Image: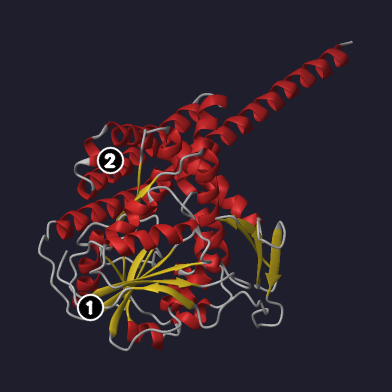
């Protein structure tokens, strides 16, 4: 009996020791998780501090450049090329801004897919209202093996007069100020950079969360640009010397591509050439009217980056969103954890939230520099608050859309569906053509597929005499 009692006591003591060891291991595991979370949070905080410093540098740089009221007056002739498609929002107001530039020697070249494009009638009307501005309308025809915008640009640059010294590219959804063209070309001359680029800023109409979503994501990328940063070309507003355009073979590089500006950026990076950012080249763009359009726009931006500059997309998706992943990990630890895990989660999430708020403050400050009058209006103020309070949620949506874009091989852009084949070729599917519901074609052998409706060279269906003009 005594032996049985001793064995029972030993077993009980051993059980208590085992439970104590398990409890100790669990505590050590929780302590290890807390330490790991704090270290991950510290790394995320360091990342956000660097991004905040970059945002401050953008704000400081933009404020200093925009205080320069008197830009130089380059004398070389500039050709502004504007691809158009459809009656998008504020189209006539946007295009009218290009006729009112205070540059003394420039001409406009609009390019559309077909004469039936609704934008063509708007362009002709503006040309008749501004007879002193040399302008022409080019019909490019249907794209067969590249994005329609790329096809339009290749058609518009098929023949460039020798007297043209600068090529300037803009999008039809951009609303340029009167000094836009002069500022871009002046910056191109004084900086001696290979190209000069501006960027866009989405202007809200009501200040909704949907508008804040696209404005915040776009603003975050805008704040990465500054005087000494490795800037990428944005196709909605950029300038390059005609000689550089030809020497770099940009028109040839566009052939068969899904995107125009990222292809130029890739070409400049390959040659080790610098792109200068000009704050006066930033243009206002109206926010999308529906959530579907907004989501499609954001998804398309990531899609283009994924298929043109895949390494940049991968870096942006994983490294650029690192602080967001750590934030949600910290929130999960704060909600489900206990003791030190909960407190480390709260502390980590709090620090990330505060630093992200600081970045949002710099974006708001930059918007006030770019749009001093608009920034005081209620929609802008509401978007600023959405950006401050919900920026991490907005960033999470962007991260999800970036991952989704990386998993897709097709995208629809202005009513045309493009598919990237495994060999890199672009398949184009035009919807609503006269021959039927859709017309699809692709390049399978490295040459454009024949299409009798594509005029080569492109047809100029309307032009105004290129006479000298005075400043607007």
The residue beneath circle 1 is 467
Up-down relation of residue 101 to residue 298 (above or below):
below
**Callout 2 crowding tier (Cα within 10 Å): few <14, some 14–19, many ≥20:** some
In space, the residues marked 1 and 2 are separated at their CA atoms by 47 Å
**Callout 1 crowding tier (Cα within 10 Å): few <14, some 14–19, many ≥20:** few
Q: Residue 432 location, x and y as percent?
A: 65, 56
Q: Residue furthest top?
A: 1
**For this view, does 456 lie left or right of residue 209?**
right
The residue beneath circle 2 is 361
Q: Which secondary structure lies at badge 2?
A: helix
Which of the two residues, 222 or 346, is positioned nearer the viewer here? 222
Up-down relation of residue 273 to residue 128 (above or below):
below
Quadrant, the N terminus: top right
**Who comes first in sequence, dot 1 or dot 2?**
2
Q: Tell me the mark number nearer the camera, choosing from 1 and 2.
A: 1
Q: Is residue 370 visible?
A: yes
**Residue drawn 66% across the image and 30% down it:** 21
Q: Is residue 198 visible?
A: no
Check if mark 1's residue and mark 2's residue have beta carbons within 8 Å.
no
Q: Which of the 4 image quarters holds residue 443?
A: bottom right
Q: Which of the 4 image quarters holds residue 278?
A: bottom left
Up-down relation of residue 107 to residue 17 (above or below):
below
Q: Residue 79 location, x and y as percent?
A: 31, 75
**For this view, does 126 lie left or right of residue 84?**
left
**Residue drawn 43% across the image and 36% down it:** 348
Q: Which color scheme did the rendering employ for the protein?
A: secondary structure
Q: Residue 167 location, x and y as percent?
A: 33, 76
**Residue drawn 13% across the image and 67% down it:** 71
Q: Residue furthest left?
A: 70
Which of the two residues, 110 or 254, is positioned nearer the viewer here? 110
């Amino acid at each position: 009996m005594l032996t049985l009692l001793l064995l029972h006591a030993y077993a009980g003591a051993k059980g208590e020791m085992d439970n104590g060891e398990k409890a100790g291991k669990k505590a050590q595991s929780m302590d290890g998780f807390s330490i790991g979370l704090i270290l991950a949070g510290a790394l995320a905080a360091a990342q956000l501090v660097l991004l905040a410093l970059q945002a401050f540098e953008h704000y400081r740089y933009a404020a200093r450049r925009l205080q320069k009221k008197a830009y130089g007056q380059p004398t070389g002739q500039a050709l502004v090329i504007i691809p158009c498609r459809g009656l998008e929002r504020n189209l006539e107001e946007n295009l009218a801004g290009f006729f009112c530039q205070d540059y003394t020697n420039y001409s406009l070249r609009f390019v559309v897919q077909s004469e039936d494009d609704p934008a063509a009638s708007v362009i002709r009307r503006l040309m008749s209202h501004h007879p002193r501005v040399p302008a022409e309308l080019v019909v490019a025809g249907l794209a067969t093996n590249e994005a329609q915008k790329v096809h339009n640009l290749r058609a518009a640059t098929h023949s460039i007069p020798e007297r043209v010294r600068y090529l300037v590219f803009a999008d039809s959804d951009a609303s340029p100020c009167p000094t836009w063209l002069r500022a871009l070309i002046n910056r191109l001359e004084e900086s001696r950079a290979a190209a000069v680029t501006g960027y866009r800023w989405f202007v809200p109409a009501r200040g909704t969360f949907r508008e804040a979503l696209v404005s915040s994501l776009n603003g975050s990328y805008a704040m990465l640009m500054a005087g000494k940063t490795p800037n990428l070309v944005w196709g909605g507003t950029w300038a390059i010397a005609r000689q550089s355009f030809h020497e770099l073979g940009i028109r040839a590089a566009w052939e068969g591509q899904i995107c125009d500006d990222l292809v130029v950026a890739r070409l400049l990076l390959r040659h080790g050439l610098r792109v200068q950012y000009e704050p006066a080249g930033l243009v206002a763009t109206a926010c999308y009217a529906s959530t579907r359009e907004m989501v499609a726009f954001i998804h398309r931006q990531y899609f283009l980056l994924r298929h043109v500059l895949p390494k940049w997309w991968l870096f942006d998706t994983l490294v650029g969103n690192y602080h967001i992943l750590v934030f949600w990990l910290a929130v999960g630890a704060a909600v489900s954890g206990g003791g030190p895990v909960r407190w480390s989660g709260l502390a980590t999430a709090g620090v990330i939230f505060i630093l992200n708020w600081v970045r949002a403050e710099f974006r708001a400050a930059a918007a006030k520099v770019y749009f001093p009058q608009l920034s005081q209006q209620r929609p802008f103020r509401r978007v600023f608050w959405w950006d401050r309070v919900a920026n991490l949620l907005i960033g999470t949506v962007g991260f999800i859309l970036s991952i989704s874009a990386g998993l897709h091989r097709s995208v629809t852009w202005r009513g045309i569906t493009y598919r990237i084949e495994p060999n890199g070729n672009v398949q184009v599917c035009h919807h609503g053509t006269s021959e039927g519901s859709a017309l699809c074609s692709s390049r399978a052998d490295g040459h454009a597929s024949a299409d009798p409706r594509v005029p080569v060279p492109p047809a100029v269906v309307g032009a105004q005499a290129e006479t000298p003009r005075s400043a607007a």
